[in-house]
Image (cartoon, rainbow, N blue to C red):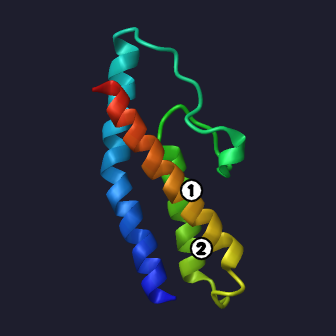
Amino acid sequence: MESLIVSLEENLKELYRKAIDADKSIDELKKQGHGKFGNIFKEEAGFNCSAKKFMPYLEETAEQILQIKESNQTPAMQKNEIESVVKKLHALHSTLTEFKGAIK
């Protein structure tokens, strides 16, 4: 279980810098009057929050990883939580990559 948590945390760290850069780009685009941004993810993406920037989604995912890490439950009992985190990390990775490609 510990190696799984380490892997999730490494993914989170990798996304952190990308999310900061993307949020700066969104701010810059707004200042220039480009685009009217809606929420990054739709409800079906599995996030509880809704935001026009990436950091709130990353923070929600980090909190969920921390809850898994601090839980006394077995991995089998946390299967749904772990699957949810993996889905969110995948959504963040792919959306940040698409966003970076779109603003170049």
- The three-letter code of the residue at mark 1 reads Lys
Q: Is the residue marked by circle 2 packed among few (<14), some (14-19), or many (20+) residues within 10 Å?
A: few
Q: Quadrant of the C terminus?
A: top left
Residue 59 appears in view? no
- The residue shown at (54%, 70%) is 65
Q: Residues within 10 Å of mark 1 (few under 14, many from 20)?
A: some
Which residue occupies the foreground of this view, 97 or 37? 97
Of residues 9 and 87, the one drawn nearer to the viewer in this rendering? 87
Identify the residue under disc 2. Answer: 67
Q: Is residue 104 found left or right of 67 in the rendered image? A: left
Answer with mark 2 or mark 1, whichever residue precedes in sequence. Answer: 2
* Residue at x 47%, y 79% (from the top left corner): 5
Compared with 47, 27 (above or below) is above
Kind of residue at disc 2 = Gln
Q: Which of labels 2 and 1 is toward the front?
A: 1
Q: Nearer the viewer, residue 91 or 5?
A: 91
State the SS at label 1.
helix
Residue 60: x %, y % from top left? 56, 55
Residue 45, image x, y percentages: 65, 47
Residue 39 seen in the current view: yes
Judging by the rendered image, the residue that carries numbered circle 1 is: 88
Is residue 25 shown left or right of residue 82? left
Measured Cα–Cα span from mark 2 to mark 1: 15 Å
- Location of residue 62 with respect to 49 vertically, above or below: below
